[in-house]
Every structure is written in structure tokens, then in C-alpha cells.
Amino acid sequence: MSERAGGGARVGTDTGTEATTAAPTDTSTSTDTGTGTATDTGGAGGDGTAAIPELVIISGMSGAGRSTAAKCLEDLGWFVVDNLPPALIPTMVDLGARSQGNVAKIAVVVDVRGRRFFDNLRESLADLDAKNVTRRIVFLEASDEALVRRFESVRRPHPLQGDGRIVDGIAAERDLLRELRGDADLVIDTSALNVHELRAKLDAQFAGEEEPELRATVMSFGYKYGLPVDADLVVDCRFLPNPHWVPGLRPYTGLNDEVAQYVFNQPGAKEFLDRYAELLQLIAAGYRREGKRYVTIAVGCTGGKHRSVAMSEKLARRLASEGVETVVVHRDMGRE
């Protein structure tokens, strides 16, 4: 079960790509890190003491969906650390407490890959309790039949089966994790769940009252340079007159007011923007229901310099005003 509107600061890269970031002023920002997502949801305590992060320990049977659970919490703004030895959990919490609120929620995946450290878990939990750390243990369970089927489908051995069969590894893991399962605050049986259903259960537990966040990348591009391979949605602006054929506009890009005004004074341009933004509202709602957190919207014209750039900026602004964290990338601007 393993399975961002214009007007902001622009960052140029050595490949000619230009990115514009913008978001509604009342939304919080997040910072991606190499091992997880640090979310600015708190700071030092009112008395000047360090804020202790909230902690979730994810464990359970191999093949029951620990990776999916970790990815879900990461998308919800948790700082996720995979396969951390239990003895280092208190140290991770201490580091989070010193981050000035930048790491307010930590999720740690503990599994049998670190079995030689597993005996330290009980001592670590006692240490966390002594420090008044708010912690929860999420245990992912599945039937033997479901686990065997999943391991066979990916053609990988169970981490504990050794020279035996998959069922032998499952039995050994159940015995090793029995006590932890009894201490779990939340047990989820994933035997009959698909990835989306598991994410929905975790969203219900950890997203609070807020709707899961959707992040969008609006990318302008030129058809003559090829379609973006990572696009979820592609829209074509070549139905609008090309400013390239207007001598006074040719040197400029869609970021210039003169070009943007020319584009949106054309018949159908404003209507297209309005209707496509309405369509994206429906799509965004469906993406959230299905657990999809990221979407790339590619807006194309012939060269990726005028029409698509102007339309991308306007569309991204509209998305940001509706609460979608949005980034604009102009892939082909400057290639001519």
C-alpha cells in the first residue's frame, strides 16, 4: 500500500525557467526539507520556554501501509522521519523543541528494520512521558492473507522471513509487535482498504477541522518545445491572437502589462479564464476527496512567451485568492 499567483518575488534558474510564488496573505507557509515537512504552526511558549512538538509514532505490520501513512502526515504538515531508531526519538523531539516553532509536529516511523533497537522503545516512551510530550501511537494492521498477497504482488521478501516463508516472517513480526499494538492509541486494519481509503481515515484523525490543503503549480509552456511531462491538466491558449505578430509587443513577455492587456482584451479570453477557474474548483474538490495534494496545471501557447504566461499569471492569482497555495513556473520564457 506504499504508494503553487503571480506578482510575487521571481526566482530565475540557470535553465531559463522563472518561478513566481504567491499565496493568500492569511495562509501559513510551509518549508520542505529533505526528510519531511516542517510547518510553522507554533513558536516558543509564552513564558519563553521552547514549545514541545506533538509526536506521532507510526508502526505496525510490514505491508500494512506505513509508507502511505507517513506520506499522508507529511502532506498534512508533519515533519516525518522514516525508520528512526527508537532510542533517538527523544533526541528528535528535543531538536524540534529548539526549532523556534518550525517543527511543531513530528511523525516517526518505527518498524522491524530497526529491530535491534526495538527494545529501547519502551524506555524512550517513558522518557517522553516524563517530558510531558503529547504523543500518539498509530498501529497499522492487516490480515495474513492480505499481507501475503501484497508481498507477492511486489515480489519482495518479508524483512523477517529469513530462509523461511512469507507467513513465517509475518508470524515473527506479529509476536515482536504484540505489546506495541496493545499500547497503540489508534489501530487501523488495512486489509480491505485501498490507498485512498487509508489516507481518508488518517485525514479524519489528523487534519482537524480544516480541509486538507491542495497545492498547485501553474506552468506556462510553449508547444514547440513539447508538452510538460509532469502536467496533470493541460490547457491551450492558441485560440487567442498571438502578440508575437504585433511588432510593438514582440520583444516583451506576458509579464508586461502591455502584453497582458492585449491578451485579455481579445474575445473569449476573460470568459475562458472565468470558466476554467470554475472547472478547477470542481476538480480541486475531487482531488481532495481522493487524497491528491499536488496538481500541476500546464498552460500552453506556441512559444511559451506571451499568451500562456499572461494566462498563467491570472489563473494562478485566481487560485491563490480561493485558498490554494500556488506557484507559477514559466518553463520556456526566455528560450527564444
Image (cartoon, helix red, strand yellow):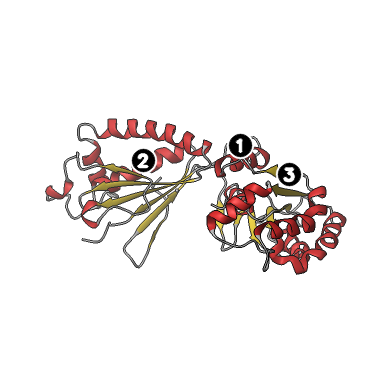
Q: Amino acid at mark 2?
A: Leu
- Mark 1 and 2 residues: CB-CB less than 8 Å, in contact? no
Give the distance between the C-alpha atoms of the residues marked 3 and 1, in whole angstroms: 23 Å
Ranked by sequence position, the earlier of labels 3 and 2 is: 3
- Residue at numbered disc 2: 315
Question: Relative to 329, is 291 above or below?
Answer: above
Report the side of 110 relative to 222 (left or right). right
Q: Label 1 neighbourhood size at 10 Å, few (<14), some (14-19), many (20+)?
A: few
The residue closer to the viewer here, 318 or 285, is 285
The secondary element bearing badge 2 is classed as helix
Which residue is rendered at x = 58% and y = 39% of the image? Answer: 197
Tell me the mark number nearer the camera, choosing from 3 and 2: 3
- Residue at numbered disc 3: 187
Q: How many marks?
A: 3
Ranked by sequence position, the earlier of labels 3 and 1 is: 3
Quarter occupied by residue 269:
top left
Q: Amino acid at mark 3?
A: Val
Q: Quadrant of the C terminus?
A: bottom left
Q: Position of residue 215 (x, y in %)?
A: 48, 46
The residue closer to the viewer here, 152 or 252, is 152
